[in-house]
Amino acid sequence: MSELHQYPWPEASSTGVGSFPGTDAGEALRTVLGELPDLAHLPELPERGTGADSTGRSAALLADLPVETGPFAWRVTQRPGRDARRAASFLSYDLEALETHGHDYQGLLKIQVLGPWSLAARLELRGGEKLLSDPGAVRDLCESQREGVREHIADVRARVPGAGLLVQMDEPLLPDVLLGAVPSASGYRTLPAVDRVTVEERLRALYAAISESGAVPGAHCCRADPPVDLLRRSGARALSLNARALPTGAEDAVGTAVEDGVGLLLGTVASTDTDLSDPAVNVAPVRELWNRIGFAPELLSVAVAVTPVCGLAGVPVDHARAVLEACGTAARVLRDDPC
């Protein structure tokens, strides 16, 4: 069984997934830092429009791989387009707001980036086909992202020098990449499945680069079929999963990850505009999963941080604040009454 000190966050921690409502980075950061004192995250504000979306925001971090918006999707190009410059401007503004409001923050700070496989499934080549269809282009993308993420970590660390960093690589499309279920640009066919060995090698290199930069590598996949074993073997030290979507049988892979010292960010608090008043409802999926795994109750609130089931973009700001507050309450309930 893993030792208690192996997990990256303090006991009874909670955090957000990534996205947040509104367009004011300062307001979002004040809320996040106020509600999440031990494991804050850099909020993403997609309601600002093109360039604030997860694809454009993450593409803006790529080193020497310019992008622009095409007719249907972001695509690789010879020089950054107007929307790419807009994405970089949004990110720069967010980091300035982080420095202003969080310069003295001392906890673990989570930043989110769209992972290489989901990014490859969303980006297009200059000719219009999905970047995922070209193994050489995927290799270049992965190398570019590794360098860009290193630079991003250094930039964030300089702005919030007292914080530890957790880099959450979002991979919502990774199950589709592995199954050969990513549609082509035309939509008339699907792209071939990518070999698991190749997927794991690319992720391992990325997670190693994050670790070498002094940050904790993490992965987020809120699907019902997250490739937990693959992500663990690749070197992710934190896994963000939707506890309400995990099927029976997932406990074996999840348990192995916990035994290896991988922390769990478990989505259990509803993100939509619903009643959040009953903590028992919010913690039930986590308790059930933990009981199926069979680990000691006292380890639960150490290995697990509580999150919403998904991002909060689109909900009222007051409700988003209430969701984060409910996550904090759920984390404390799991500490005080894990079973």
Image (cartoon, helix red, strand yellow):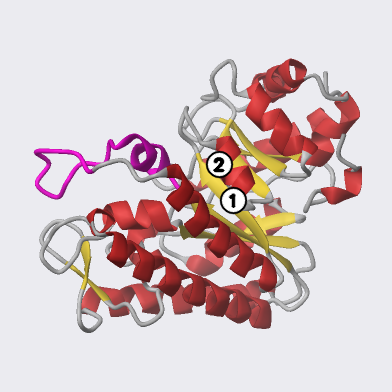
Q: Is residue 43 placed above or below 96 in the rendered structure? A: above
Magenta-drawn stretch contains 104? no
Residue beneath disc 1: 234
Question: Residue 225 location, x and y as percent?
Answer: 47, 29
Q: Is residue 103 placed above or below 330 in the rendered structure? A: below
Location of residue 51 (image quadrant): bottom left
Rate crowding at label 1 as few (under 14), some (14 to 19) or many (20 or more) other CA atoms within 10 Å: many
Q: Is residue 91 placed above or below 226 in the rendered structure? A: below
Question: Residue 313 location, x and y as percent?
Answer: 42, 48
Residue 74 located left or right of residue 205: left
Question: Residue 105 location, x and y as percent?
Answer: 75, 69
Residue beneath disc 2: 230
Residue at 65% from the left image edge and 73% from the top image edge: 101
Residue 327 located left or right of residue 67: right
In this picture, which residue range is highlighted in magenta?
171-191
Residue at 29% from the left image edge and 78% from the top image edge: 66
Q: Nearer the viewer, residue 156 or 101?
A: 156
Residue at 90% from the left image edge and 42% from the top image edge: 3
Question: Residue 168 location, x and y as percent?
Answer: 57, 55
